[in-house]
């Protein structure tokens, strides 16, 4: 005698192995079009989609743009003039004589959806991208060079700056990047 057959009406027990195996047979008996539509609906009902935003808006900090840098003249512009023009830096790295301006832009939006039997949840999440503008000064606090960098997503900002310093201490020249 099977125990799940003796359950009062309205209450259902877990399916037995025969019912599970017969589910595939039920799918095979429907038309291929219905199967494709059902699979597509399930696929679309759950998951996520990344939507890039080409004209990314700043989420944090103030973006340093190429037009803001016309005043920087090698050997002439002082550290004080740079701070007066660009504002207070995010980091004033005195040991290296570098000013760091950091900002975060939205590089895209992640649309997520989770669907279940008779309910669903959805939302949008901003996908951030961090940037840094580094200004290097000489021993007399005169502008030497500058560089815009894009921080890798899973690296801390401090480690990112230390690695940049170590690369440039070995004689490697900074790579100029367009803003």
Image (cartoon, rainbow, N blue to C red):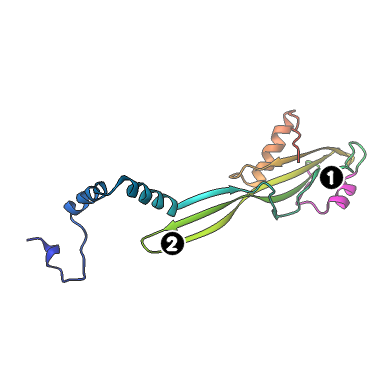
Residue 144 or residue 114, whichever sits in front: 114
Q: Position of residue 3 (x, y in %)?
A: 12, 63
Residue 9 or residue 35, whichever sits in front: 35
Question: Any magenta on residue 82?
Answer: yes
Residue occupying the point 70% across, 53% down: 57
Q: Nearer the viewer, mark 2 or mark 1?
A: 2
Looking at the image, residue 137 sits to the left or right of residue 61; the answer is right
Residue 45 or residue 127, whichever sits in front: 45
Looking at the image, residue 32 sits to the left or right of residue 120; the answer is left
Please give the count of numbered marks on the rendered protein: 2
Q: Position of residue 174 (x, y in %)?
A: 75, 33
Above-or-below relation of 15 to 35: below
Considering every residue shown, the one lying at the far right of the view is 76
Q: Quadrant of residue 97?
A: top right
Residue occupying the point 88% across, 41% down: 72
| Secondary structure state at the residue bearing disc 2 | strand
| Secondary structure state at the residue bearing disc 1 | helix
Looking at the image, residue 165 sits to the left or right of residue 123; the answer is right
Which span of residues is magenta-colored? 78-95
Q: Mark 2 or mark 1, which has the lower sequence index? A: 1
Q: Where residue 79 is drawn, which disc sits there? A: none
Cβ atoms at labels 2 and 1 below 8 Å apart: no
Residue 99 or residue 43, whichever sits in front: 43
Residue identifier under label 1 = 67
Residue occupying the point 93% across, 39% down: 76
Circle 2 Cα neighbour tier, 10 Å, few/some/many (<14 / 14–19 / ≥20)? few
Considering every residue shown, the one lying at the far top of the view is 171
Residue identifier under label 2 = 120
Q: Position of residue 17 (x, y in %)?
A: 18, 52
Mark 2 and mark 1: Cα distance apart in space: 47 Å
Q: Quadrant of the N terminus?
A: bottom left
């Amino acid at each position: 005698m099977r125990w799940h057959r003796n359950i009062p009406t309205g209450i259902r027990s877990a399916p037995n192995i025969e019912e599970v195996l017969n589910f595939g047979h039920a799918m095979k008996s429907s038309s291929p079009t219905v199967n494709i539509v059902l699979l597509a609906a399930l696929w679309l009902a759950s998951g996520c989609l990344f939507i890039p935003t080409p004209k990314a808006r700043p989420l944090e900090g103030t973006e340093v743009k190429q037009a803001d840098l016309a005043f920087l003249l090698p050997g002439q512009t002082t550290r004080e003039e740079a701070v007066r023009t660009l504002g207070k830096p995010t980091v004033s790295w005195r040991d290296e004589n570098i000013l760091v301006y950091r900002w975060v832009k939205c590089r895209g939006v992640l649309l997520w959806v989770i669907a279940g039997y008779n309910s669903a949840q959805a939302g949008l999440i901003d996908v951030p991208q961090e940037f840094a503008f580094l200004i290097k000064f000489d021993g007399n606090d005169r502008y030497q060079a500058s560089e815009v960098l894009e921080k890798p997503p899973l690296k801390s900002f401090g480690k990112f700056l230390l690695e940049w310093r170590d690369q440039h201490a070995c004689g490697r020249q900074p790579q100029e990047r367009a803003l």
